[in-house]
């Protein structure tokens, strides 16, 4: 008879737990995004790092379970454009660093999240130098998620709660299809804006703003004449 060893920082599920219970807690994530090896409840931060290095696939770590990050061409494009604008702002203000959709961070013990865009102030970076560690223990000041059909509302609800529990200060949820964005200053306090309104950095990125429609419309081919 074989026995399983639960590594430190992983979650040992209750004896009567079912896979349906786990999926529900994860936010009804599609099953094809949940990795079975390592077995749910036993995965570690080291597994996230190993798989990214070996397979070039990004997984978040939640309750000792590997959940593949939902990626898409459009969401990656929007994230890159927004990250570029924030980096141009940071060139002038020097408040911190901005990373994109492969910027893995352990925001709490055993919890790895990978926002599509993250801003981390220098005050939160030990030594004031960009970490060399692939998955540093960092909590961003701003976390941005670009929504897509592959992301469930339950998954995003859980993420927002985790972000603020970890001390993220501002969360933007951008929906390119609906051309709307939800600006969270706490899990339950948010403002929803349309394409004519502005994403404002508030006191996290003071002075930074971009009209949502201007950001999203960069996707369209520029025609001559």
Image: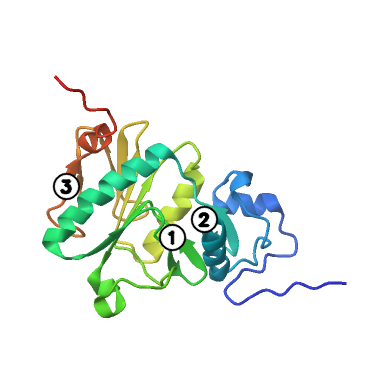
Q: Residues under labels 2 and 3: Cα distance? A: 33 Å
First-in-chain label (3 vs 1): 1
Looking at the picture, tell me which residue is in the foreground, 56 or 137: 56
Residue 136 locus on image (x, y percent): 41, 71
- Is 223 on the left or on the right of 54, as rendered? left
Mark 3 against mark 1, which lies toward the viewer?
3
Name the residue at 14% across, 57% down. 206
Label 2 neighbourhood size at 10 Å, few (<14), some (14-19), many (20+)? few
Q: Secondary structure at mark 1?
A: helix
Residue 183 vertical position relative to residue 128 in the rendered view, above or below: above
Residue 162's label in the rendered image is 1
Check the image and name the residue furthest to the bottom: 127
Give the residue pinned by disc 3. Answer: 209
Q: Looking at the rendering, which quadrant does residue 32 occupy?
A: top right
Residue 56's label in the rendered image is 2
Name the residue at 18% across, 65% down. 95
Q: Residues under labels 1 and 2: Cα distance? A: 25 Å
First-in-chain label (2 vs 3): 2
Residue 173 vertical position relative to residue 50 in the rendered view, above or below: above
């Amino acid at each position: 008879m074989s026995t399983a060893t639960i590594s430190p920082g992983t979650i040992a599920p209750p004896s009567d737990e079912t896979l349906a219970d786990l999926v529900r807690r994860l936010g009804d994530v599609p099953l094809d995004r949940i990795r079975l090896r390592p077995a749910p409840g036993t995965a570690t931060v080291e597994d996230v790092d190993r798989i990214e290095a070996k397979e070039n696939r990004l997984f978040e770590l939640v309750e000792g379970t590997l959940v593949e990050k939902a990626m898409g061409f459009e969401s990656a494009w929007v994230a890159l454009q927004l990250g570029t604008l924030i980096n141009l702002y940071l060139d002038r203000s020097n408040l911190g660093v901005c990373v994109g959709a492969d910027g893995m961070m352990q925001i709490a013990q055993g919890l790895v999240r990978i926002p599509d865009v993250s801003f981390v102030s220098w005050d939160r970076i030990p030594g004031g130098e960009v970490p060399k560690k692939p998955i540093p223990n960092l909590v961003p000041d701003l976390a941005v998620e670009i929504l897509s059909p592959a992301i469930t509302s339950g998954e995003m609800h859980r993420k927002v709660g985790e972000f603020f529990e970890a001390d993220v200060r501002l969360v933007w949820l951008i929906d390119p299809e609906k051309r709307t964005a939800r600006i969270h200053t706490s899990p339950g306090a948010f403002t929803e804006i349309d394409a004519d309104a502005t994403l404002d950095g508030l006191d996290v990125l003071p002075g930074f703003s971009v009209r949502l429609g201007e950001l999203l419309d960069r996707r369209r081919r520029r025609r001559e004449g």
